[in-house]
Amino acid sequence: MDDNGWNAGPADTSTETTADGDSTTEHVGFLERLWQSITGILIGLALIAATVWGIFWNEGRAIGTTRALNEGAGVTVTVPATRVDAANEGTLVHVSGDLRSNGTLADSDFAISSNAVRLVRKVEMYQWKEEQRTETRSNAGGSQTRTTTYEYSRVWSDRPIDSSRFRRRDGHENPAMPVTGRSQTAPNATLGAFRAESRVVGLFGSSADQKLEVTDAQLTAFQRRLGAQARLNDGGVYVGYDAANPVIGDMRITYAVLPEGAATVVARQVGQGFGPYQASNGREVFLGEMGAKSAQELYKHAHEANSILTWILRAVALLVMWIGFNLILRPFVVLADVIPLLGSAMAAGAGIVALALTLVVALPTFAIAWFWHRPVLSIALIVAGLAGAYGLKLLGERRRPAPRRPTAAPAPAGLGGQQGWPPQAPAPQGWQQQPQAPQGWGQPAPQQPSGFLNVPQGLRPGQQ
């Protein structure tokens, strides 16, 4: 790279090792940055195209799910949980009854057992985690200095972190996890007289699980498997010497169960059990919650979940499209970055322009997607909007006051019946009133009221 940073070859890299991690500095030349930004245009176009497709897919998914739920709500039949009626085969049924395990679930590794519908073992290990943070600094001439700092922290994780991929592995090795988490479901679970297979139990999310505490009698199996440092801690098992000061390799093992109790399912009756109901548009209806609830409650919650997911995906689509437009505008930022201050201003402007372009493209795409999937409703909304705007216009015109026309007011009485406005003020006492000037050529002078004397022009008051 020359003094001005015009380098199209590989970036110059230097590494600095600190007590907490590594710091890597890269010097990227102007031509290399420009080439990377031009390549980013293709990525940006791909992101925008994928976002447009994703918007159509998400709106179609949301509308399809809504239609399936509405269709399901119209054909759902509430049946008692105490008896399986073969006449309801293939029907979308609403069943509320007692969920039972009909057996014992056991963790054979540690002799933990429970009469629960689901048994979950959660294992966490204290491990090293690598995090990286990149800072960039623009240089005169368009080159850029990128400093990437690799930092290492200790965290509890329920998944093994592969330390062999760390940039700095010395002193940051993670041991293998001797045991991992697992989940098992009662194979003979029932909901009233119906079978509740694992896919039915899966409808009841983890939020319904309750903590299962490990007892002193069960601790022996943990010590035999994991060593004498295994001890009870906060209802679970801690494998280590000091739970308040963990070290790399310490573990926490806890258990949770889905207890027996009332549960509700809306599903298609299949033999002695349940399965997904397929609506006419191909979408599935398969709902379940813990507790005795009505079918309307399950459908209401399903509609709410569908709405939340739809808005989350819409927000993600807007973000991805904004990133795509930023990548397309990136070459202009790189060109302006020859002067770092100008490059910063251009980057801020590019972000605003990218946001404007995102709204210009995304909002019509949402409208077209709605029109594509729901043309009748979209046309009805457009017609209703135009009709409403026209109605407001007519209402505004009717309420607007008519312009006033000037009218001549009648002269006050007492001036000899002379009409016209404004009236002439009476002459002071001792003065003689002069005749008014003619209103126009060829018009006679107005007749003077009786009692007034005509005073020749040029005479002063008091003269005859």
Image: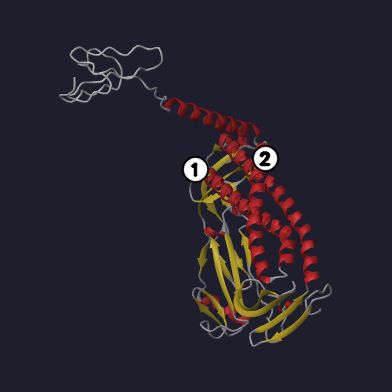
Q: Determine which residue is flagged by label 1.
A: 294
CB under 8 Å between discs 1 and 2: no
What residue is drawn where x is 46% and y is 29%?
396
- Which one is in front, 99 or 372? 372
Could you tell whether 82 is left or right of 333 in the image?
Answer: left
User: Could you tell me if residue 446 is visible in this image?
Assistant: yes
Label 1, label 2: how far apart the Cα atoms are: 37 Å
What residue is drawn where x is 73% and y is 84%?
15
Q: Residue furthest right?
A: 9
- Which one is in front, 251 or 310? 310
What residue is drawn where x is 28% and y is 21%?
457
The quadrant the C terminus occupies is top left
- Residue 368 numbered mark, or none: 2
User: Could you tell me if residue 272 is visible in this image?
Assistant: no
Task: From the top left corner, tell me how far across and down residue 188 is, in percent.
Answer: 61, 54
Number of marks in the rendered image = 2
Q: Residue furthest left?
A: 429
The quadrant the N terminus occupies is bottom right
Task: From the top left corner, tell me how far across and down residue 36 is, in percent.
Answer: 78, 66
What residue is drawn where x is 55% and y is 45%?
303
Q: Earlier in the sequence, mark 1 or mark 2?
A: 1
Task: From the top left corner, tell me how far across and down residue 66 is, in percent.
Answer: 60, 41
- Which one is in front, 274 or 181? 181
Q: Amino acid at mark 1?
A: Ser
Per the image, label 2 sits on a secondary structure element best described as helix
Q: Amino acid at mark 2?
A: Ile
Could you tell whether 404 is left or right of 283 in the image?
Answer: left
Q: Tell me if residue 296 comes above or below residue 167 in the rendering.
A: above
